[in-house]
């Protein structure tokens, strides 16, 4: 991309579903920060429930425009990825034909929109890759593999068209290179944007004890076991905090769905990692 200047930019952000989640939190924080720097920010999405969203999206800091909410998220609880692609493509075409050119468009999660956005040559497209989607999808059966093959191919090819690709860590950057081998061979590598949040609030001395916090949905792709394994390594000889008092350190895992079954699985994993686990269950009426 061209060298960044101090001029104010007209920026569009395209996100699949502006609900409540980690990806949505990052996009909202990015929009708020860009707006605070004087840039003109406009968020486009296929779904935005004003009763279930982050408050910044309805506070007027930046406009949110919805296109394609009538399109299905799935077909009889199948074809979720295909429906997500179609919804985002609809948003991209609406932005292309119904709005003047933006200086920069930030596309989040779904890369298939990038070729559409690049039709206007004056627009630079930034793609934020949380993690290669093909690694999160199941390829367990022949039908699934056939279904995913064109989607996985489209993900890699369209990702490489972006003017700039961003990831949140060196780990994700290495995973990107190992997954998208064609792009890596062409020298297309993502830039690491870290940290993705404002960490100034953590600079002041604190009397709070060390606590690892994991907030995720309880599902396979979130790999919650990694948090348990990392916490167990605190007391290992190679632990990064070996010179600090970690006697009262704790690990808090917060999530939803299938609590009883997941809790038993986590207890088993903790036992293998020599970590004590205490479970508490809050019913939906508390949420």
Image (spheres, rainbow, N blue to C red):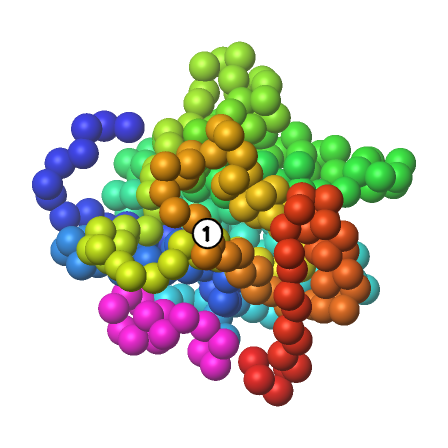
Q: Is residue 10 left or right of residue 221?
A: left
Q: Does 88 sit above or below residue 65?
A: above
Q: Position of residue 216 (x, y in %)?
A: 57, 58
Q: Is residue 242 above or below residue 101?
A: above
61 drawn magenta: yes
Q: Is residue 209 left or right of residue 79?
A: left
Does residue 57 appear in the picture of this structure? yes
Q: Closest to the observer: 120 or 274?
A: 274
Label 1 sits on residue: 247
Is residue 51 left or right of 276 when viewed as pictured?
Answer: left
Residue 143 locus on image (x, y percent): 87, 40
- Residue 139's x, y, as percent? 79, 38
Residue found 67% across the figure and 44% down from its top? 273
State the image quarter where residue 117 is shown: top left
Q: Residue farthest to the right?
A: 142
Q: Residues within 10 Å of mark 1 (few under 14, many from 20)?
A: few
- The answer to whether any part of residue 111 appears in the image is no
* Quadrant that contains the N terminus: top left
Instruction: Say whether residue 66 is left or right of residue 84.
Output: left
- What secondary structure is found at the residue carrying circle 1? loop
Magenta range is: 50-63
Query: In the image, what residue occupies the spot 14% across and 48% down?
Result: 8
Q: Main secondary structure of the magenta part?
A: loop
Is residue 62 shown in magenta? yes
User: Where, by quadrant of the figure, is residue 195 drawn?
Assistant: top left
Residue in the image at 89% along x and 36% along y:
142
Give 174 or 159, whichever is nearer the viewer: 174
What residue lies at 54% left-to-right and 34% top-to-bottom? 236
């Amino acid at each position: 991309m061209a060298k960044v200047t101090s001029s104010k930019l007209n920026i569009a952000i395209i996100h699949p579903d502006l609900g409540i989640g980690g990806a949505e939190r990052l996009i909202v924080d990015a929009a708020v920060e860009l707006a605070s720097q004087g840039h003109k920010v406009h968020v486009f999405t296929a779904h935005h429930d004003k009763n279930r969203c982050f408050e910044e999206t309805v506070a007027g800091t930046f406009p949110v425009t919805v296109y394609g909410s009538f399109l299905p998220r799935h077909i009889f609880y199948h074809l979720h990825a295909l429906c997500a692609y179609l919804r985002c493509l609809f948003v991209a075409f609406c932005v292309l034909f119904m709005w003047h050119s933006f200086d920069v468009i930030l596309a989040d999660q779904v890369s298939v929109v990038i070729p559409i956005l690049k039709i206007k040559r004056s627009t630079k497209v930034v793609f934020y890759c949380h993690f290669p989607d093909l690694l999160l999808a199941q390829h367990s059966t022949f039908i699934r593999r056939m279904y995913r093959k064109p989607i996985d191919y489209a993900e890699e090819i369209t990702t490489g068209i972006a003017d700039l690709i961003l990831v949140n860590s060196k780990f994700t950057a290495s995973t990107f290179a190992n997954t998208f081998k064609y792009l890596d061979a062409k020298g297309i590598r993502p830039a690491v944007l870290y940290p993705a949040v404002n960490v100034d609030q953590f600079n002041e001395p604190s009397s709070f004890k060390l606590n690892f916090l994991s907030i995720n949905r309880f599902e396979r792709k979130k790999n919650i076991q990694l948090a348990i394994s990392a916490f167990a390594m605190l007391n290992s000889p190679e632990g990064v905090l070996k010179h600090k008092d970690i006697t009262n350190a704790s690990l808090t895992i917060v999530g939803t769905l299938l609590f009883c079954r997941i809790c038993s699985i986590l207890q088993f994993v903790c036992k293998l990692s020599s970590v004590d686990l205490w479970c508490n269950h809050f019913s939906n009426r508390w949420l």
